[in-house]
Image (spheres, rainbow, N blue to C red):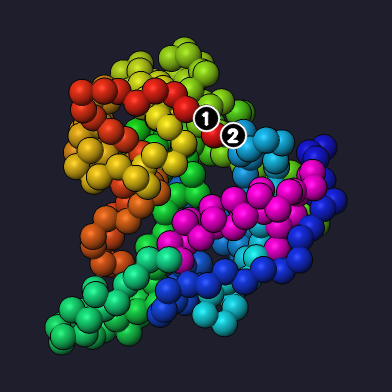
Amino acid sequence: MHPALPHSTPLVTLAAAQPFDLALSLRAMSGFAPCAASSGSSVPWCARRSRWPTAARWSPRFAPAERGVSVVLHSADELSGAERHQVEVAVGRWLSLADDTAPFLAAARADPAMAPVLAETEGLHQLRFASVAEGACYFVLAQRTSQAQAGGRKRRLARVYGSALDLGGITYRAFPTLERLAELSVGELAPFTANLRQSEYLAAVLGRLASWPLGWGYRAGTDELMAELRDIRGVGEFTASGDRAAGVRPARRGPGGATRVHQGHRGAVRPRRVHG
């Protein structure tokens, strides 16, 4: 049996930059098989944040709300106000609620060829991976590998090293934390990769990501971030560009082809490990 979730928080509404339509986010989730997790009009999400004081284990459910999404948090341990805020921030970043799509939409509306696309996607905000660790793992595992195989290996990694919680008779599984994955050796990663080289690449990416300061990706410039990604062994343009989708800060592109950039830096001084 997995831990149950006896604690729940009051419903909170998170505002989204308009236009925003959660139904389009749910459709995007269900269409991306390696991360498909939606169910009807609400989405359960299980996670474990080892950098938080209590290493809280929690699962938010969110559903449509006027001009945003409503969120209820279910947790194995009672969450502090600061932890609840961090969960809400994480959900907002996952769904890109704060992304301002107005400049892109203005340009798209001026192009008649975009009319049928906007009719289907105007309220879509670009989805990120639920965590940098999950996205980084997926894009390394997807190197010279089909989406189906990479997704399957990512799910096996979650089953072996992730945590799980029960809510309403259903088990929800969290992807392992970055810190947990960075502790694994090349040999321990090998059962989840295509070959030894991919295992070495994955270990290199996880180790570098775990060494970066918490939240630094929101402050570093895009050029610095991309230079740091390319400096990691096994990371070329495919993985660097893909890892943006795992990241924490939007690049300057519209929702149809938007990218995400995650933590990184390259310069005269390598960032030190900082956990806050």
Residue bearing mark 1: 275
At x 70%, y 42%, the residue is 57
Residue 7 visible in image:
yes
Q: Residue at x 31, y 67 (%)?
A: 255
Q: Are marks 1 and 2 in contact (CB under 8 Å)?
A: yes
Three-letter residue code for mark 2: Arg
- Answer yes or no: is residue 42 visible: no
Q: Say left or right for 200 vs 111.
A: right
Which residue in the structure is indicated by mark 2?
Answer: 51
Where does residue 157 sit, x and y in percent of width and height? 54, 31
- Examine the structure image and report whether residue 102 is included in the region drawn in magenta: no
The stretch in magenta equals 72-97
- Examine the structure image and report whether residue 88 is included in the region drawn in magenta: yes
Residue 135 in the image, given as x and y percentages of width and height: 42, 42
Say if 66 sits above or below 148 in the image.
Answer: below
In the image: residue 9, left or right of residue 176: right
Quarter of the image that includes the N terminus: top right
* Mark 2 Cα-neighbour bin, 10 Å: few <14, some 14–19, many ≥20: some
Q: With respect to residue 12, does 165 lie above or below?
A: above
What is the spatial separation of the Cα atoms under label 1 and label 2, in whole angstroms?
7 Å
Name the residue: 44% across, 41% down. Answer: 215
